[in-house]
Amino acid sequence: MLRDQTAIVGIGQTAFGKGLPDSELSLACQAISAAIDDAGLEPAAVDGLAMFSMEDGREVEVARNVGLGDVTFFSQIGYGGGAGCGTVGHAAMAVATGQCEVAVAWRARKRAAKASRPWAQVSSRISGHWQWSRPFGVLRPVDEIAMLTRRYMHEFGATREHLANVALAFRKHANRNPAATMHDKPLSREQYLDARWISEPLCLFDNCLETDGALAVVITSAARAADLRNPPVYVHAFAQSIPQQHQVMTNYFCDDPLLGPSHACAARLWAQAEVTPRDVPVAQIYDAFSPLIPLSLEGYGFCARGEGAAFTDDGALEWPDGRLPTNTSGGGMSEAYVHGFNLVLEGVRQMRGTSSSQVDGAEVCLVTSGEGVPTSALLLRR
Amino acid sequence: MTSTGFLLPDLEDPESAPFWEGCARGELLVQVCTSCGARRMPPRPMCPRCRSVDHRWEATSGRATIWSFVVPHPPLLPAYQELAPYNAIVVALDDDSAIRFVGNLVASPDGAINEIDPASIEIGDPVQVVFQQVEDVTLPRWVRA
């Protein structure tokens, strides 16, 4: 079992912004370099790499630029926003099984880069599963998730007020985080309810922020971590999932489309862990769109099916007094949307005790990747 | 990009070509496993229930109910943005509610996808398939039953 055998010992990130001049590869190298420095290691020590398949840069280019040593493990994970925790988990497994000693996982993203925006890659004719949705104007991720959201509202009584709970909680956290894109921009419930539609029933503030930027983490063995400068943040548990009969994003064709990938991922994750959802005081939950939060709260077992929307009431997601302060750096909706990888780094900060919205005494943090796609999740422990 | 600017299916895709050929004939087809009889949508080479690769295509009643819907607003690809806000729906077949299709609710077979007032659409509304030719493709669409 992977449990606590490895630890995250370094984190690094670039600034977040729109239209950053650097290439995706350059941003990746800058974040990786910063993470190696944070760990107090030399680039030559890095011998493992795990990345998103949906990225312009490649392992060989990263290794040549950052000046890595001989790399003996490298892995790519697909499905966009579902990959983040997966890259960390694969790196951790590689370290734990001796395939490498020090691994880096990262995500760099340029919103202008074609590889980062699959829906904008318009070819003349569509084959594969998109042919069943895109001709009819279900074009963007927001349209695809809005379709599930409407059904979720219908089946379980969720409302826009619930989705506002999510957007407002994450914005409040961003307002406390100087690195967040929305640090200086408060959001009121009135602004949320009056916002323009993007794909009804989802409005502007139900969407994440398309962001340029990069983030990276360094993973090594617990034994080696003990000698490094930062307090180790252990990879307590890790899981991935492709649920039965799942279809990427347009998951409309199986028996129970609202039973998302988080359910299967959670079953494996908790089976690997010494803790239960009750023991988790802080979470970083993938939030490309606000309705993914209630779906994930249900999937990861913080409440029963259909109760995820009501869970968000009474400030439950808000630091410091909520039942489960969530996306404490602002998340994809208010800090930056770097395919959810910023959630991993915020999980590490919570375990180091250095978050701008630090949950006192938190000893374990859940981090999740995309709901609606083949996904992954981590339990981090200090 | 196609000449109309709409995103259209690749009619050469071997897994789906019989479906689109059926639409051209005015039939809404579903792939059925010849071995165990399970219907499957979207089409694929192997039956996930019995692992047979043998299949046939069967016509359906074309009657369905609205399972969910969205109303996209800009920014969108130009051909769709011109029509926004419009509706897109998912319907569940009356013949077999596990078989669903994405489409649009229109007032008539050749009607525009923005001619129905979105506020009038409700989950559970009964609909009937109709067909519209766009370039060399025939798309299934839905009118109120």
Image: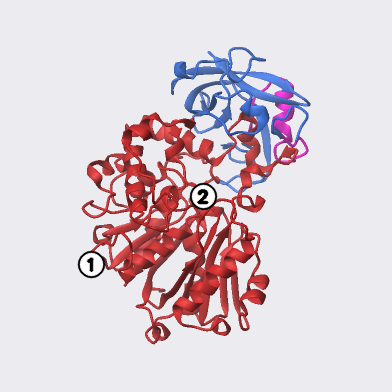
Chain colours: A red, B blue
Label 2 packing within 10 angstroms: few (<14), some (14-19), many (20+): many
Chain assignment, label 2? A
The amino acid pointed to by label 2 is: Val
Residue visible at 25% across and 41% down in the picture: A313
Query: Which is more toward the observer, A342 or B128?
Result: A342
Question: Does A186 appear above or below A369?
Answer: above
Where is mark 1, residue-wise?
Answer: A361
Q: Is residue A182 above or below residue A163?
A: below
Image coordinates of residue A60 in percent, x first then y, are 67, 72
Report which residue position mark 2 lands on.
A373
Q: Is residue A184 shown above or below B59?
A: below
The reply, left or right, for residue B1 in relation to residue A185 is right
Residue displayed at 34% across by 38% down: A164
In the depicted view, which residue is nearer to us: B73 or A85?
Answer: B73
Callout 2: SS: loop
Query: Is residue B29 one of those drawn in magenta?
Result: yes
Whether pointer 1 and pointer 2 mark residues with C-beta atoms closer than 8 Å, the reply is: no
Residue type pointed to by label 1 = Gly
Q: Position of residue B124 (x, y in %)?
A: 44, 22
Mark 1, chain letter?
A
The quarter of the picture where residue A235 lies is bottom left
Residue A228, horizontal then vertical, whole percent: 40, 84
Distance in Å between CA atoms under marks 1 and 2: 33 Å
Quick check: A285 above or below B44?
below
Q: Which circle's residue, 1 or 2, is located before the other in the chain?
A: 1
Q: Position of residue B38 (x, y in %)?
A: 57, 37
Q: Which segment is the magenta one? A: B9-31
